[in-house]
């Protein structure tokens, strides 16, 4: 609280150097003014260099975190504030760009859950067998199965859509599943 009383309020136009020095002394209003002055142009620079909006936003955030932390080290006699701000931004952008290109330090401990080529081939072969078995069903049974499993309709909805009694849908479904099981059992053996 003593810092806030020791630093006069910002009024009018302040130079970049003044804003950085005040930020170094803990003046949040000066930091906010610096952010308002440079965030947009730093974002544009980061976006051009990184080519990704999310990473550019991260670079802007890192820039201003670094400015907040290191503003105490800024020396106005070494040069104007804008090049110092852009130097901090450049470092954050380079860090973001390196983070993208660096490979993982260690291989993950867990096995991947994705199917390998042999598993995908087996799934494809099984799907082909199921489709052949479906084609072998009578049209009425195939229609009930298609509506129930691919259109995800309940048996009541299937009955309503086809305009047949619910009991008929259940009978056709039971018969279709029985036929499929028999055909697939022969095919997969």
Image: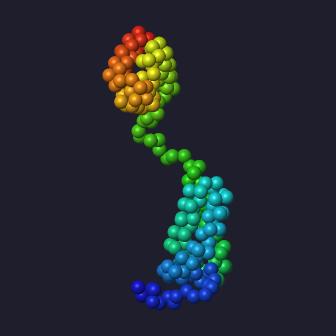
Residue at the (41%, 39%) spot, across then down: 110
Residue at the (51%, 69%) spot, across then down: 65
In depth, the one of 61 and 178 nearer the eye is 178
Q: Is residue 34 visible?
A: yes
State whether residue 5 is above or below residue 60. below
Is residue 113 left or right of 97 when viewed as pictured?
Answer: left
In depth, the one of 114 and 126 nearer the eye is 126
Image quarter hosting the N terminus:
bottom left
State whether residue 108 is above or below residue 60. above
Image quarter hosting the C terminus:
top left
Coloring scheme used: rainbow
Residue at the (58%, 74%) spot, across then down: 36
Residue 149 coordinates in the image, percent (x, y):
42, 27
Give the image quarter of residue 85: bottom right
State whether residue 129 is above or below residue 98. above
Residue 92 coordinates in the image, percent (x, y):
58, 63
Q: Is residue 130 visible?
A: no
Residue 32 coordinates in the image, percent (x, y):
54, 76
Residue at the (34%, 25%) spot, across then down: 166
Residue 87 coordinates in the image, percent (x, y):
63, 69
């Amino acid at each position: 609280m003593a810092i806030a009383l020791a630093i006069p309020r910002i009024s009018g136009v302040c130079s970049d150097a003044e804003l950085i020095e005040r930020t170094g002394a803990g003046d949040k209003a000066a930091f906010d003014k610096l952010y308002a002055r440079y965030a947009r142009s730093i974002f544009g620079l980061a976006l051009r260099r990184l080519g990704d909006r999310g990473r550019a936003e991260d670079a802007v955030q890192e820039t201003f975190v670094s400015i907040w932390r290191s503003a105490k080290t800024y020396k106005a006699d070494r040069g104007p504030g804008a090049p110092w701000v852009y130097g901090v931004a450049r470092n954050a952008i380079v860090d973001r760009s390196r983070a993208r290109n660096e490979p993982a330090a260690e291989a993950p401990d867990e096995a991947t859950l994705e199917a390998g080529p042999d598993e995908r081939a087996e799934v494809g072969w099984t799907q082909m067998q199921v489709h052949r078995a479906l084609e072998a069903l009578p049209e009425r049974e195939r229609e009930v199965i298609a509506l129930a499993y691919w259109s995800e309709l309940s048996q009541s909805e299937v009955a309503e859509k086809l305009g047949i009694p619910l009991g008929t849908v259940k009978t056709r479904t039971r018969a279709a599943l029985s036929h499929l099981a028999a055909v697939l059992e022969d095919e997969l053996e």
